[in-house]
Image (cartoon, helix red, strand yellow):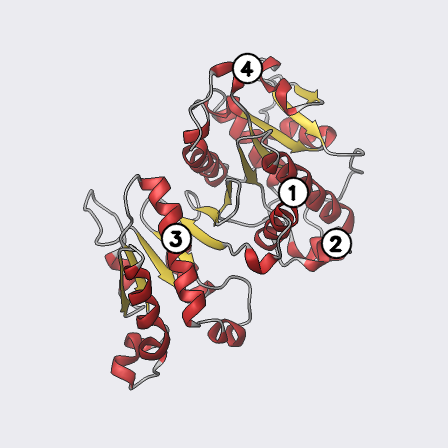
Amino acid sequence: MTSIAAPHEAKPIAITMGDAAGIGPEIIAKAFVTEPVFMRQCVVAGDVAAMRRAMALVTPAGVPAWPVAHISDSRDWQQVPLRCLPVLQVGAPLATVAMGQVSAVAGEFAGRCVVWAAKLALEGEIAALVTAPLHKEALHAAGAPYDEYPGHTEMLQAIAAQHAHVSVAQLPVRMMLANPELRTVLVSIHLSLRDALAAVTHDNVLQSLMITHSAMQQLLGRAPRIAVAGLNPHAGEGGLFGDEEIRTIAPAIAAARVQGCDASGPWAPDTVFMRARARNGKEPEFDVVLAMYHDQGLIPVKYLGVEQGVNVTLGLPLVRTSPDHGTAFDIAGQGRADPASLIAAVRMAQTLAAPAQTPC
């Protein structure tokens, strides 16, 4: 780890604007207004005009809207006064888009912001990256190169691999979803259920365990207790309901333990998440659950509420977090969106980046 930076060397956290037709701009604006001191170290990678519209939207009638400052360099963030929102304009200005509608224009700009900010992070110009929601259909409609990626995770993985001059396969990443009560990491992300089942291999489970161990050790300052969920009902019940636990998952856990990983299981997936849940001040049995596929791991976390949920990409050579919700086209442009998950994502990014910078 690098030493803690001096105040004049502190780097900002960049928040990508997300899809301009969704709630991204307004939750960013609302986060700055509701938490001005905490958000002081953040800059927005997006469009100045779109952020001015968002700021006007979240400002009560009769109250002056915060000014939105156009900055040309990430290093200029400290020159922006408190209660002024700094925006790094990403390329040409964005044309006005209709709220709540899929737009290739908005999709292209959202993708452009992610690529631009990720490169700043990889070059060490920003401390961390927080991504506001983009719309997968709009991203696909934008065409190449954005239509190659199902979402943020895969796009950031490809950008980081290209930067490191390695193949995507040589830079494995995993998704972690976390809130104050529960953390889960996924063996696979955006795959059909049939393909996700095929992805439960010894190597994928072992790799997931080691990525989780490394990332959580940095976050907690100690070796994490990792519970591994089974794939089948009752974790296979000794092979009665499937033998993936015996053939694949248990051997991967054993191999991870040899490498110093505090992993256990496979546990019955219908109860293990309760055992890892922190509530009423009670210490959970586990720090994180490794789930075998997307919905197995995300449904428990999202059921507890998306307001404080944070998506973290593990395995990248940069810190990236995001809110635990989408673009919410149904309420976009109404000023009703809750910024709590975005604020939680900034807080998580700040924690993960802390060893290399001065806290806010």
Indicate which disc residue 212 carries. 3
| Relative horizontal placement of residue 190, taking residue 237 as reference (left or right) | right
- State which mark lies toward you, 3 or 2: 3
Q: CA distance from mark 1 to mark 4?
A: 25 Å
Q: Which residue is mark 1?
A: 114
Amino acid found under the numbered disc labelled 3: Thr
**Sooner in the amino-acid sequence: mark 1 or mark 4:** 4
Horizontal placement of 211 versus 71: left or right?
A: left
> What residue do we see at 27% from left, 68% from top?
267
Label 4: element kind: loop
Give the CA separation, mark 2 to mark 4. 37 Å
Q: Is residue 330 visible?
A: no
Q: Are marks 2 and 4 in contact (CB under 8 Å)?
A: no
Disc 4 packing (10 Å; few <14; some 14–19; many ≥20): some
Residue located at (26% from left, 80% from top): 237
Residue 54 x, y percent position in the rendering: 65, 32
Q: Position of residue 346 (x, y in %)?
A: 48, 34
Which of the two labelled residues, at mark 2 and mark 4, occupies the earlier sequence position? Answer: 4
Compare marks 4 and 3 and give the one earlier in the sequence. 4
Q: State whether residue 118 is above or below residue 212.
A: above
Inspect the image, locate mark 1, and give the three-letter code of the amino acid beneath it: Val
Which residue lies under the disc numbered 2? 145
Residue 49 falls in image quadrant: top right
N-term mark: 1 or 3: 1
In the figure, is residue 186 to the left or right of 156?
Answer: left
Crowding around mark 2 (Cα neighbors within 10 Å: few <14, some 14 to 19, many 20+) is few
